[in-house]
Amino acid sequence: MRSRLLLLFAVVVTALAGCSAPEPARPGVLTAGLAEPGTLLPADVEDQAGRLVTGALWTPLADYDAATGTLTPRAAESITSEDRMTWTVRLRTGGRFHDGTPVTAKSYVDTWQLIAGRQWAATSVLTKSLRAKEITAPDENTIRIVLDRPSGQVPAWLAAPGLVPLPRSVLASHDWTGFARHPVGNGPFRLDGDWQPGTGGTLRRVAAGRPDEVDLRVGDPVEQYDAVKDGELDLATSVPGERHDAMHADFADRHTTWDLPQAGYLVFPAGATRFADASVRHAFALGADRSALADGPLAHQADPAKALLPPAEAPGARTGTCRPCTFDAAAAKSLLGQAGFTGDVPVYAEPGAGEWTRTLAAGLSGALGVGVTARPQPSGGPADGPSTVELKPGSPSPADVLGELAAAAGYTDPGFTGDLAAAEAAGTPQEAGQLYRVAENQALRDLPAIPLWTGHGHAVWGPRVHDVRTTPFAGLDLARLGS
């Protein structure tokens, strides 16, 4: 009998040893799930996961709220100009990189000079938007920027998360692969060791505060969502489409959604004469079922567009509705018939947009009563039909989106161009915002590009997490999370 009891005890102990109990929570330490970042080189980041990590490792010069035109200095003490031609940035004193070297005005000047000569995500902010004639560092804490025309958008451009400084070591070595594996920033967290692809890494706070450590874990978003629900993970930084409907019931007040600097459009090339009639383009706009895109191939990671400017770039709310953003199949078919438009239409998809382009094309075909098929972008020569375009602007300035759409379509309407110039030269953010809306309205009348969808981010968290704050470019602010 005694030997049987000993055997039973041994079996129970063995079974218990094989069970994995949830890891006990450590005070001041949070666990967060995310997708694999595309890169951790801040000037080339375009994805949400990459911005989450680099937003914790770097402090930008400032934050800029496109809706209100409000500038909040961060690494900068001030960003000022008397004539909107020459701008002065004063840095806060004492800034240091995580390797202990000082952050100076020359750090920014040298970094920007290098970015301008590359083909990185942030390059266009310097070369196409800012277009400075001269950028110098008169002293250790002063950056002087001289433009080629007056512009009030400089604060918005300098708030671009890709324009953060790089340390002298990587500016000299150009070892971008090694630096992306172990980035060295000037932000509230440093990376403890190398980033491990497929696994993640640990962020440790540089100065006192909570959380003092964030354990970032790369994994499947469905599994991460369920792990937060089961108490095995504190935070999931994305919500997959298949969990979207359950999110409100599963997490009540422990979830959030925020606008992303990301939007999808259907762009008509200026040289395609079949679409020269604006009523044809309006018919395509009314025939686009945006909800079918958001609920289908975009998997609840986007909203149907309600304006040409996405919310993350918009200078406040629109005062009127966007008629070309409305799905009205009957009106679309009637308008196309009145224009005498016939024949099949190719819709060209840029790389990565094939799935939602096919859904768009099928919906347009049914609504308009003409054959619309999705095709890959032609390898050479001008396109003979519209193309789907996904924009990921590098700064919160409305000028970036409107300018990029006009360039993609070859749209050169004098009224639109004049409105853009007037908005950029405006004396106040409020005046600029009104003029950007005027330019947007002109483009919505002419429709060189049809707005389709705007991206948004999701997050869910457990009961240990509080004070969750988000911004369009950095996403979740890990430095301000309470635990």
Image (tube, rainbow, N blue to C red):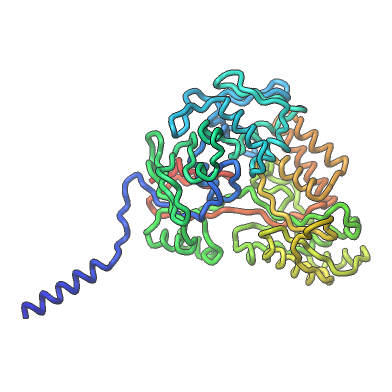
Residue 400 at what x, y percent from top left?
Answer: 71, 42
Q: How many marks?
A: 0
- Above or below — where is 149 with respect to 176? above
- Name the spot of residue 86 as percent of width and height, x first: 70, 23
Q: Nearer the viewer, residue 95 or 468?
A: 95
Residue 459 image offset from top left, x and y in percent: 50, 54
Where is residue 120, by image quadrant? top right
Side (left or right) of 162 relative to 182:
right
Whether residue 380 is visible: yes
Residue 36: % across, % down:
51, 54
- Residue 153 vs residue 273: left or right? left
- The residue lying furthest to the front in this view is 173
- Indicate left or right for 397 with 97 as reference: right
288 left or right of 16?
Answer: right
Q: Residue at x 45, y 48 (%)?
A: 195
| Location of residue 377 (image quadrant) | bottom right
Viewer-closest of 176 and 422: 176
Quick one: which residue is furthest to the top in this view?
Answer: 139
Question: Residue at point 63% right, 33% down?
Answer: 112
Above or below: residue 1 compared with residue 62: below
* Quadrant of the rendering where the N terminus is positioned: bottom left
For image coordinates 23% across by 71% down, the residue present is 15
Q: Residue furthest left?
A: 2
Residue 323 visible in the picture: no
- Residue 368 sits above or below residue 411 on the image: below
- Vertical relation: 224 (above or below) 448: below
When asked about the image quadrant of residue 450, the answer is bottom right
